[in-house]
């Protein structure tokens, strides 16, 4: 029995004609096996299938089906489907607009595409679809198909050691802090243990992660317990004690705050013999505590930038790709070259540059189509630096989430959120998820 996607003119008809009348019976499900318009927490699911007949069945037996209007782009709904699946711990998800059918499998925090076909081809692929999400398959009466996400037995084991990543450019205003905090949130949502270290005397990351809960310097509770004390003492102020838990994302992350006092203490700190290497020692002490450490750096060629790059394993260079930022790449390369010479003396390998990250990029369609490709191509050609695959665009959501406030008594206190939490289905959130995936792939975590 063939299915004609042309009979579905709206979302309601996709639900009734494709899913209820055609697909579910073909997969062996009866009305007792599925629930329509199910509300769980704050989510409303189009369809929840469970051949065990109960909503709280074990994860692999649950399937979320989301129906969309025939004109809807399914790519825009993939993130939302993943959040639905995570919320109820389902094993599979289906997205369809009648013109296309996609099946995903959820494993280890990721949504993996395992099947797709055009609507008019559904009948031709019914055996394949039954082999993935058919009732007999999920109830264990047929063998599961081999899928691309099943890792080969010869897959190389990856290192579980903590990785340190500095985010640095000597030009300001290129999106360093935005990159650090939202990348940290994206990594945390992938169940990675994340520590953020703010090494910039402007303390933008400290503010952006919501650690400044006072509006009068008399109540400053960061002044005597921040990265300055970490760098000033060999014996005291370990990172584990100075780090504070930030609720700017869920799950929470740990942040070592900065303070404006860093600026006036730079000269004195530079006179201390161990100042350039103390962060290495203190990072070694927390090797088992975190998977990834992200260091936000000052837009300068100063001591704090030097300390960060001496201590790091990897480097991300955010850039808006404008002329001054591009010219600054020469300074960055020379700075790293000098620091690599010092790293060699202390028997540390050269810094691994993950790449230049295009950030704060205009989303204007003509710019993206005509100008951006030229700017992206210019970096490897002119500066011999690799561009990262991900592009972070200027988005309203990125500005709004950092400006959130909350009222405590008579005071309005900054209460910023990561874009992953403020607008989880937004293009900005998707871009940072892509960045997290790229980073994890390149650092092999």
Image (cartoon, helix red, strand yellow):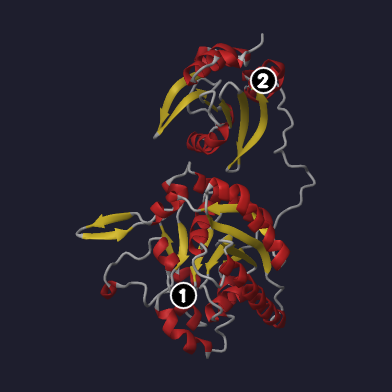
At a point 70% along the width and 19% down the height, the residue shown is 125
As drawn, which residue projects farthest toward the right? 154
Give the secondary structure at mark 2.
helix
Q: On the rendered image, what quadrant is the N terminus found in?
A: top right
Q: Nearer the viewer, residue 409 or 319?
A: 319
At a point 57% along the width and 28% down the height, the residue shown is 95
Q: Nearer the viewer, residue 146 or 262?
A: 262
Q: Position of residue 43 (x, y in %)?
A: 42, 33
As drawn, which residue projects farthest toward the left? 410
Label 1 Cα crowd, 10 Å radius (few <14 / some 14-19 / many 20+): many
In terms of image quadrants, where is residue 245? bottom left
> Do we see residue 168 in this rendering?
no
**Numbered circles on residues, count:** 2
Left or right? Give the position of 6 relative to 16. Answer: right
Q: CA distance from mark 1 to mark 2?
A: 57 Å
* Vertical relation: 392 (above or below) 213: above
Q: Position of residue 156 (x, y in %)?
A: 76, 51
Give the secondary structure at mark 1.
helix
At a point 57% along the width and 74% down the height, the residue shown is 308
Left or right? Give the position of 343 relative to 270. Answer: right
* Vertical relation: 244 (above or below) 269: above
Residue, disc 1 = 227
Q: Position of residue 83 (x, y in %)?
A: 50, 38
Q: Which mark is on residue 54?
A: none
Left or right? Give the position of 289 relative to 351. Answer: left
Q: Which mark is on residue 130?
A: 2
Label 2 Cα crowd, 10 Å radius (few <14 / some 14-19 / many 20+): many
At a point 48% along the width and 43% down the height, the residue shown is 426
Instruction: Say whether marks 1 and 2 touch (CB < 8 Å).
Output: no
């Amino acid at each position: 029995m063939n299915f004609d996607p042309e009979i579905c003119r709206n979302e309601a008809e996709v639900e009734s004609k494709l899913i209820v009348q055609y697909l579910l019976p073909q997969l062996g499900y009866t009305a007792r096996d599925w629930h329509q318009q199910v509300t769980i927490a704050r989510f409303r699911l189009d369809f929840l299938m469970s051949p065990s007949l109960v909503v709280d069945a074990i994860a692999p037996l649950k399937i979320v089906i989301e129906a969309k209007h025939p004109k809807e782009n399914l790519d825009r709904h993939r993130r939302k489907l993943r959040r639905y699946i995570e919320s109820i711990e389902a094993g599979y998800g289906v997205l369809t607009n009648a013109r296309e059918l996609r099946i995903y499998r959820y494993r280890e925090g990721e949504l993996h595409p395992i099947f797709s076909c055009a609507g008019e081809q559904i009948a031709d692929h019914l055996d394949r679809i039954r082999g993935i999400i058919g009732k007999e398959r999920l109830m264990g009466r047929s063998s599961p198909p081999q899928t691309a996400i099943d890792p080969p037995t010869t897959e190389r084991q990856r290192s579980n050691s903590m990785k340190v990543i500095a985010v640095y450019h000597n030009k300001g205003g290129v999106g360093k802090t935005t990159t650090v905090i939202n990348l940290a949130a994206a990594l945390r949502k992938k169940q990675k243990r994340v520590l953020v270290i703010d090494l910039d005397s402007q303390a933008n990351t400290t503010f952006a992660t919501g650690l400044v809960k006072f509006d009068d310097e008399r109540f400053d509770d960061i002044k005597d317990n921040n990265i300055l004390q970490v760098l000033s003492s060999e014996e005291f102020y370990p990172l584990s004690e100075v780090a504070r838990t930030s609720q700017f994302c869920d799950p929470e992350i740990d942040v070592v705050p900065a303070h404006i006092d860093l600026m006036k203490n730079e000269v004195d700190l530079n006179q201390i013999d161990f100042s350039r290497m103390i962060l290495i020692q203190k990072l070694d002490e927390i090797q088992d505590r975190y998977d990834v450490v992200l260091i936000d750096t000052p837009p300068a060629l100063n001591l704090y930038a030097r300390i960060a790059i001496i201590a790091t394993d990897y480097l991300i260079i955010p850039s808006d790709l404008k002329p001054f930022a591009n010219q600054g790449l020469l300074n960055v390369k020379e700075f790293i070259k000098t620091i690599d010479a010092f790293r060699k003396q202390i028997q540390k390998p050269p810094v691994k540059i993950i790449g230049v990250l295009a950030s704060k990029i205009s989303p204007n369609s003509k710019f993206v189509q005509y100008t951006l490709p030229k700017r992206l191509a210019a970096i490897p050609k002119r500066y011999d630096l690799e561009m990262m695959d991900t592009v972070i665009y200027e988005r309203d959501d990125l500005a709004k989430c950092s400006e959130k406030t909350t009222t405590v008594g008579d005071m309005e206190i900054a209460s910023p959120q990561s874009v992953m939490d403020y607008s989880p289905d937004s293009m900005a959130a998707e871009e940072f998820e892509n960045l997290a995936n790229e980073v994890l792939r390149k650092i092999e975590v």
